[in-house]
Image: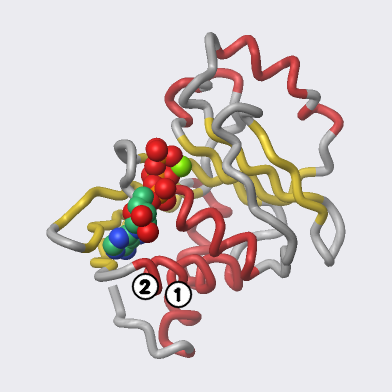
Amino acid sequence: MSLARNLFLPDPEATGALAAALAASRPELAVVHLHGDLGAGKSTLARAWLRALGVTGPVRSPTYTLVERYPLAGGGEALHLDLYRIGDAGELEFLGLDDADARLWLVEWPERGAAALPAADLEVALEVNGTGRACRLAFRGPAGAAWLSGFDSECRLRGLPEP
Ligand SMILES: Nc1ncnc2c1ncn2[C@@H]1O[C@H](COP(=O)(O)OP(=O)(O)OP(=O)(O)O)[C@@H](O)[C@H]1O
Ligand SMILES: [Mg+2]
């Protein structure tokens, strides 16, 4: 069984629908690494994901703060990181994330924090393709395998094109 899915996201709304399907099927604790060049659509996906989890206030880009934290209605918090400007992976220690009751990690530029980050259950790779985005999902480990089957059913329920 392949643990990867390839999709084409023609517009930001499609990215939003993907985020909603991933949010609805996610495991209780999910670590997501978001790969892709500048402007590939990582923040668009993260913002839609947070909205799908009921975050209603402003969703700021963590470009300079490195992390933004959001309490979740069901308990715990979501962490949105953007490590593009991190000096070295050691800086992650100073963000106080050890104290976080994290249920969801959405990490842009994870390669820059590599060793200091928890391992991904899902890696999302986005790439500009025409006016849309090509997207590859790679689900990792036992949590990822369960997530994938939930994600596939969620796509069927929502009438999203089956990857
Ligand atoms: N599926 C899509 N189709 C077309 N345009 C999209 C899609 N997803 C996002 N975009 C657009 O791409 C632009 C850049 O998106 P975004 O800021 O999310 O990129 P990013 O990967 O977070 O970049 P950075 O690395 O600079 O943080 C935005 O204008 C957004 O509307
Ligand atoms: Mg971004």
Q: Residue furthest left?
A: 130
Q: Residue at x 60, y 63 (%)?
A: 26
Residue 93 sits in quarter:
top right
- Check whether the beta carbons of the residues at disc 1 and disc 2 lie within 8 A of each other: yes
| Residue that label 1 marks | 17
Q: Quadrant of the N terminus?
A: bottom left
* Dot 1 amino acid type: Ala
Q: Residue at x 54, y 34 (%)?
A: 82
Q: Residue at x 77, y 29 (%)?
A: 97
Q: Secondary structure at mark 1?
A: helix
Residue 29 in picture, x, y percent from top left: 69, 51
Mark 1 CB lies closer than 8 A to ligand 1: no
Residue 158 in picture, x, y percent from top left: 46, 87
Q: Is residue 99 left or right of residue 14?
A: right
- Label 1: how many residues lie within 10 Å, few (<14), some (14-19) or many (20+)? some
Dot label at residue 14: 2
Q: Is residue 45 above or below residue 21?
A: above
Q: Secondary structure at mark 2?
A: helix
